[in-house]
Image: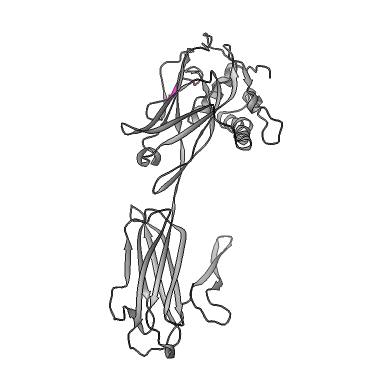
Amino acid sequence: MKGIGYNRKNLIALALAGILMGCILFSSKSWATERIEDTRPITITAIADPSSVLGKEYQGEITVDMYKIAAFDTKGKLTITDGFKSDKEGEKISFAAMADEGADVDKLTDNVKSSIVDPAVAIVKSTSKAPDETFTVKRENGKLTGTKAVSSGIGLYLYIPREAKDELHTYTFTPFVVSLPTSNALSKSTKVDANGNVVEVDDASEAWNYDVTISLKSDVTSRPASLEIIKTLKTYNKSLGTAGCVFEVNAYNSENQLVFSNVYPINFTAAGTQSILIKDRIPAGSYVEIKEAYSGSSYSIDGLIQDKNSAVIESLPADEITQVKFNNDYDNRIIEGTIAVENHFVKVQDGDNVSYKWESNNLSQDTTNTGN
């Protein structure tokens, strides 16, 4: 592939697009006064913003994979590498977007993503391509950071931080591209500082910078956790009919905000044990209150009429099913049984008007519910 060159205006726009994505981009025409020293050592440093959830809470390691999409010579002309040459649909990398003089920064960022980043990611996935460089970001002196000496030469690199998890959250990262090396002039006197923030600098030098810093930007989602409520009815009075009970589940985050709330019925037609599995619906780390709001018309906790009808989980863990158990027994009252019903409604939107339409309940067609 022939080298591709662009004017100064597009170089600045492309650099700014990269800054907005947390890195510094380099276009293929070198207008800096210095030639690139292709034998000079290059390092890349990744850092997470300390004010982000990732920067404040994540204590593990993050692996960053880097793939060399294109090499460039000492004059800055790009040549796509063999591993990223493809004619397949969705895998065709094009640098043409970088030559669009009319594109603003936002448009240029979108174009770089669609014409370079997305096809490159597709090639990596379809070929199971091994990274050219891999390095680790971990917590040092209170910050998430990592530095790598790059041995694969000057060029344009795709970087893909791998998904990371801790007890409460899943962190996913947006792949993008970074040039090694770059210059302050290309980034229009902006850079990623030691805290992972984009800042202005007084130095607008066109000298090449061989120590490049990128900022790790992540999307954070709460990990789901599972809860199983196990209910045992020790003795059943058949003459009183179905014994229904209802459990109320409320979960709160660390700021005491309600993040989950629902009720769950169980109906017994005989003594025994039944359970309700609430799978992957409650955010991990939640403080959870489980209350048996109704224990049956003639049944009580352990056969006694008392108030001990709730359980508390201080922090609900992910990757396992946390169980809570309730034991009830007949308490010698003679009150006919009832059936606990869980109704389901669907939201109906008609312009600005919102209503809820009954859809179904947990009763079978013969109205006999034997629980889950």
User: Which of the 4 image quarters holds residue 29?
Assistant: top right
User: What is the total number of numbered labels drawn onto the structure image?
Assistant: 0
Q: Is residue 76 above or below residue 128?
A: above
Q: Residue at x 29, y 73 (%)?
A: 308
Magenta highlight: main SS: loop
- Residue 60: x and y in percent read 38, 39
- Residue 219: x and y in percent read 47, 42
Q: Residue at x 52, y 70 (%)?
A: 344
Q: Is residue 53 above or below residue 337?
A: above
Q: In which quadrant will I find the N terminus?
A: top right
User: Which of the 4 image quarters holds residue 298?
Assistant: bottom left
Colour theme: one colour
The answer to if 366 sits in the magenta stretch is no
Viewer-closest of 290 and 227: 227
The answer to if 189 sits in the magenta stretch is yes
User: Which of the 4 image quarters holds residue 132?
Assistant: top right
Q: Is residue 262 above or below residue 26?
A: below
Asked whether, in this view, residue 176 is left or right of residue 301, the answer is right
- Residue 175: x and y in percent read 53, 34
Q: Is residue 220 above or below residue 256?
A: above
Q: Residue at x 40, y 17 (%)?
A: 202
- Residue 72: x and y in percent read 59, 17
Give the magenta part as a residue range.
187-196
Viewer-closest of 213 and 330: 330
